[in-house]
């Protein structure tokens, strides 16, 4: 059972969508939770419903939707839950028999290890990794190799979700797990991705090659360009990102179809791993999703 710790806040906002039917299979979104500060509320609602309805019905749809909203919204919004939001959340917790308790602010800081906790801390099960064989239906895969900083991992995952790399391979050693700190830095992106963590980086790369993927690795000394690979537009591509202290391993560099270098013109001859990953995924990603 999940356990929730809450601290009340006082504002005047809502925790519901206002959706009106205006025709056959046509609806008008007139209102949405303030916690979901999105430029496209219709897409936000669609994403939440897709996520909620696609999950196994181990809990009520209301509970699954509330969980999606919590991750999709409150973590991302960066503000504390309002009193109406907190009241509605408590109602849903009670309705679904999820245990919770009210605690002092200091206890929330202690539990979350941060002062930026939105007024609520949720204890959940471990991150549900995807079996690696289920990832190879994505046209764009991301492999992290030797990235040891959890904040870098979270930042890379955030960019990966945005740019269409929704299948991610994390080595079972040498790269942090999807810890709460990683989820937080990712702004909840991990909820909308398939991430596996059950093999080595070399094993993932070998599996991808056998499955017909081209392997593209980022390296400071690479001579391939992002523009050239984008123009070639390979049907299936695995992008490999290395760490700042330890780059992509030599085994993967030897088997890679492309070793990509990002031109740099400043005096600091290095890019943060998450920044380099973002540049590459922006160039090579897109709305490719998973294959049928």
Image (cartoon, rainbow, N blue to C red):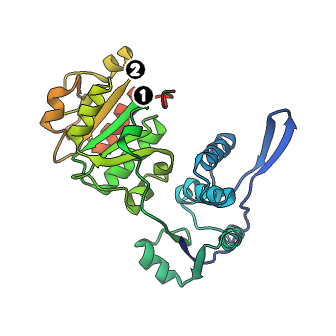
What residue sits 68% from the left and 74% below the top?
94
Residue 166 on image: x %, y %: 44, 39
Is label 1 in a helix, a strand or a loop? loop
User: Is 233 rendered above or below residue 57?
Assistant: above
User: Could you say which disc has been placed on residue 235 in the image?
Assistant: 2
What x and y, as percent, mark residue 104?
53, 85
**Where does the image place residue 85, in percent across and percent down from the top left?**
68, 67
The answer to whether any part of residue 215 appears in the image is: no
* Lateral position of residue 137 relative to residue 89, left or right: left
Which of these two is toward me, 122 or 58? Answer: 58
Mark 2 Cα within 10 Å, few/some/many (few <14, many 20+)? few
Q: For mark 1, what is the residue? A: 139
Residue 231 image-quadrant placement? top left
The quadrant holding residue 73 is bottom right
Answer with mark 1 or mark 2, whichever residue precedes in sequence. Answer: 1
> Badge 1, how many Cα within 10 Å: few under 14, some, many 20+?
many
Alpha carbon separation for disc pair 1 and 2: 6 Å
Q: In which quarter of the image is the N terminus?
A: bottom right
Tell me the residue at 40%/51% (across/down).
Answer: 129
Name of the residue lying farthest toward the top? 232
**Relative depth, front residue between 119 and 257:** 257
């Amino acid at each position: 059972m999940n356990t929730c710790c809450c601290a009340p806040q006082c504002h005047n906002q809502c925790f519901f969508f206002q959706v009106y039917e205006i025709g056959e299979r046509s609806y008008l979104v007139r209102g949405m939770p303030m916690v979901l500060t999105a430029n496209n509320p219709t897409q936000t609602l669609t994403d939440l419903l897709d996520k909620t309805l696609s999950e196994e019905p181990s809990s009520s749809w209301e509970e699954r939707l509330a969980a999606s909203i919590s991750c999709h919204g409150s973590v991302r919004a960066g503000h504390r839950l309002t009193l109406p939001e907190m009241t509605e959340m408590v109602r849903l917790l009670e309705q679904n028999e999820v245990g919770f308790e009210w605690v002092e602010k200091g206890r929330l800081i202690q539990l979350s290890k941060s002062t930026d906790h939105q007024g609520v801390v949720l204890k959940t099960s471990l991150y549900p990794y995807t079996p690696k064989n289920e990832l190879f239906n994505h046209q764009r895969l991301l492999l992290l190799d030797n990235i040891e900083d959890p904040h870098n991992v979270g930042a890379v995952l955030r960019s990966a979700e945005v740019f269409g790399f929704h299948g991610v391979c994390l080595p079972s050693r040498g790269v942090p797990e999807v810890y709460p700190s990683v989820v937080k830095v990712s702004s909840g992106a991990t909820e909308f991705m398939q991430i596996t963590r059950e093999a080595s980086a070399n094993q993932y790369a070998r599996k991808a090659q056998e499955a017909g993927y081209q392997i593209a690795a980022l390296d400071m000394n690479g001579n391939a360009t992002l523009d050239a690979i984008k123009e070639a537009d390979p049907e299936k591509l695995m992008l490999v990102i290395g760490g700042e202290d330890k780059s992509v391993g030599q085994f993967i560099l030897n088997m890679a179809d492309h070793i990509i270098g990002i031109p740099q013109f400043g005096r600091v001859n290095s890019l943060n791993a998450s920044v380099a990953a973002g540049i590459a995924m922006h160039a090579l990603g897109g709305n490719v999703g998973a294959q049928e």
